Image: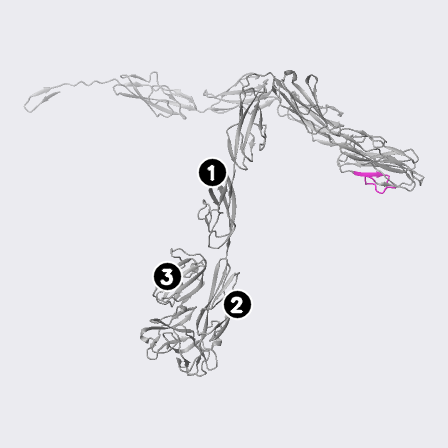
Amino acid sequence: MTVTDANGCQATDQVTVTVNENPTADAGFDVNVCFGGSVQIGGSPTASDGTSPYTYAWFPSTGLSSSTAANPNASPTSTTPYTVTVTDANGCQATDQVTVTVNENPTADAGSDVSISPGACTTLNGQATDGASPYTYSWSPTTGLSNPNIQNPNACPSETTIYTLTVTDANGCSVQDQVVVSVGCPNITANAGTDVSICPGDCTTLNGQASGGDSPYTYSWDPTTGLDSPNDSTTDVCPTVTTTYTLTVTDVYGCIAQDQVVVTVYPAITASAGSDVSICSGGSVQIGGSPTASDGTSPYTYLWSPATGLSSTTTANPNASPTSTTPYTVTVTDANGCQNTDQITVTVNPCDTSCTVTANAGADDAICSGSCTSLNGQATGGSGGYAYSWSPVTGLSNPDIANPEACPQITTTYTLTVTDNNGCQDSDNTTVTVSQGPTAQASSNSPVCEGATIELTSGPSGMNSYAWTGPNSWTSSLQNLTRPNATTAMAGTYALTVTDGNGCTDTNQITVTVNPCDTSCTVTANAGADDAICSGSCATLNGQATGGTPDYTYSWSPSTGLSDPDIVNPDACPQTTTTYTLTVTDDNGCTDNDQVTVTVNPNPTANAGSDDTICSGSCTTIGGLPAASGGTGPYTYSWNPADGLSNPDIANPEACPQTTTTYTLTVTDSNGCTDEDQIVVTVYISTLVANFSATPTSGCAPLTVGFTNDCTGLFTDCAWDFGDGGASTDTNPTYAYVRPGLYTVVLSVTDQCGLDTKSSLVIVGEHISDSSGGTATTQDSNVRIDFDPGDLETDGWIVIDQAPEDTTGTIPANYYRLGQTVVELVAYDSGGNLITNFASDVLLVLYYLDVDQDGIVDDSNPPIDELTLKICKLENGQWVEMSGSIVDIYANAVSVALTHFSIYILMGQSVIAPNVNNVLVYPNPFKPGKGDAALKFLNLTPDATIRIYNVAGELVRIKENITTGAACWDGKNDHGKPVASGGYFYIITDNEGRKKTGKIAVIW
């Protein structure tokens, strides 16, 4: 290149462009592959020309062993074109493509597994599907096949063989399947039939069957005893004893199956009609054996024939009274239906009235169990030709002879009946006493080593004699003995025979082993580590043996408290601390000892305390004092359930259950030993409700009032406070009020859970004079206003009982005391009917002459302008101030307009000095949890103090220096916590030390 600038100056330079040869890519020829197979792709070589070295990039990479190799293996799941990009050293590229076609594989089915008998053949049912036909078939191994290269060859293997079928389709894709040809006896079954039972002497038919395998079958019954056709499938059988028959079935290929059937032969029943007897003409005799039926299976039924002369044909021993000699046959049938018969002949002779036959059964005898004795029966007198009959027949060789052998298993009294030719009879008894005899008990310390001592012990104690025999004619008559310096010649069988006082004997044998002694015995006993248990508990002893020559025997001593003293690991349950010694003996008789101590720790004693009863909402302290003793302290405590407890893990918790509860105390001492005790805390729910009535409830002084206690529930005490300082503990008292006043009567009743109270008012009035009084006026001149105590018996609020009989509306009175004088206004119309509401307002005027309440109207009474006076009416048991009251300072009166009738009182405050006895306390009972906001104290004296105590005399609340004339209590103690339901006392003290007391009930 030449460059020329503006001045014509030039410069030249040169560049060479080299053109590189492109590489050549060869992806190889398109190829086929079977599904699941792989093929190598790429050319030979894949890259050429250009400039090596080359890099390769195959796309897609799916199914490739490598996408960057020259010749990767391709295993696609479907036909895929693969593109290779070849890049040479100069960055020049070339591409090529190869398609890998994926052919579907065929499916091979070698058929179902099959079983054949030895020597038999079967056809293999090979099949091919899918892929591309035609198919070729190849079976392996070829052993036993008619042709291994056809689809369905015959297979006749001599042993069980697994044949593999390989199917190859037109694309060369191959698959395999297998079939098992089992050579054996397939499914051949023998059926010998159902078990059957027969009576002795009867026959039955066995019905054998065969199935499976290859017919025809052959049959064989075993044993053949009692069979008529032992090689037939069906055969009659008549066994004499219960027999198990085995049926063997063999098919055509020699395959065998077996089955069994049991033919049970019922035990034979024995019939005994008794021995032939003779009777006198007109006489009778009891026939039948003793017993008539035996063996077989009870219960039995009986049938006698002929019936002539029999008292019954169906009893075991009927009375026979034939008129001529008669043979009687009895047929006995047992519970299985098996029968037997026997016959007796009753001979009828002319009667000899003088029977002189005498039976003698012989002297009583004694035998040992399993032994026999001869009965020595005899007959004398009579007419000769005696017949003998012994009863019972149990254990007798023949009950119809004079001297049978008697072999009873238990002590038995036998009766001999002798009958002469004339039918005359006599009986006698003899007793055979059976001694059960001793049981010989032989034992030894075998095995032992040579040179050791053989110890032989026997039992039971108290035998008349002991007889030992042993190897080499050794004998001894000692009960327990030793043979020192044991040799192998002393080894062998030792027999012990014991004889008791009745001469009865028994023999027992043992084997004594004497081993050559290994002078260096290496057996070691290990009794385990010492242990500790609680009294009444158990521990497992962990014994061990090592060294020596197994097998080992173990012996623990003492055996007291052990589950088994002859095992390696017994349970030990001693009652006191015990040291157990374990003795281990090996197979050579070598021994070793070791000891273990089981310490028995005493159990603690739990004391939950005595059962207790509390009131609902109250608490009690549970647990004894102390709650635990014995054992080994310190103790831990656990109460269950924990409900209502202040702390379930201390000895004496507070228990405040809501319902009756059984608490269980578990005490555990420092050794882990425990004990339990229980306490029942019964929660008493009081049903006590105080109530009373009074008659009369008002009147003039002196006034006698009768009180009736109407309480519900059970109460233990009652107390009356009559409001004037008087009191009584009578149930239904009578009380006389001598001074006028408004008195609150309180009845307090108590049960085990406290008290309930009821209060009511008694009004004791003063007689009215004509000097002065209150005035009530109305615009209705036809209205009469007066006071009528007869209309107010339900409330008792009345003070005037001598009202004038005029219509002027003037109510005469001498004076009223503030806070005490109560009046009720009653009005009638001209017809004498009580008016409930006024047609127009009525003016009520109340005078306050004795305002300082000293009982004297004089200059000491405070002037009206220093008083706060009000008229109150009674509503729902409380005084409610009326609005619109007018104070007349000149007339010393307070007036108010009324619209209806009620009960009214004149109250004063300020400088008036109220009396502490006039303090009103309500409501009572006080129910803070059921709507009552507070217990109210009204008309308090200045600087009053209120103290509230529970029934135990404990101060729960105090209010001091009260200046407002009123106070409230919310039911909580001085710590702000609610008090429990129950009875409480209050004491109100004024500033001069005067007191008023009362009782209240608190119910939550």
Amino acid type at circle 3 is Lys
189 or 918, which lies in front?
A: 918
Give the mark nearer the N terminus: 2 vs 1.
Answer: 1
State how many labels appear. 3
Q: Classify mark 1: residues with Cα within 10 Å, few (<14), some (14-19) or many (20+).
A: few
Q: Is residue 496 above or below residue 378?
A: above
Q: Give the CA separation, mark 1 to mark 3.
A: 52 Å
Q: Position of residue 986 (x, y in %)?
A: 42, 62
316 within the magenta span: yes
Give the mark nearer the N terminus: 3 vs 2.
Answer: 2
Residue 202 visible in this rendered orientation of the protein: no
Dot 2 corresponds to which residue? 732
Prevailing SS of the magenta stretch: loop
Q: Give the CA separation, mark 2 to mark 1.
A: 62 Å
Q: Classify mark 3: residues with Cα within 10 Å, few (<14), some (14-19) or many (20+).
A: some
The answer to whether the residues at label 1 and label 3 have Cβ atoms under 8 Å apart is no
Dot 3 corresponds to which residue? 959
Amino acid type at circle 2 is Asn
The disc placed on residue 670 is 1
Q: Range of the magenta residues?
A: 301-317
Circle nearer the viewer, 2 or 1: 1
Which of the 4 image quadrants contains residue 458?
top right
Asked if residue 185 lies left or right of residue 714, the reply is right
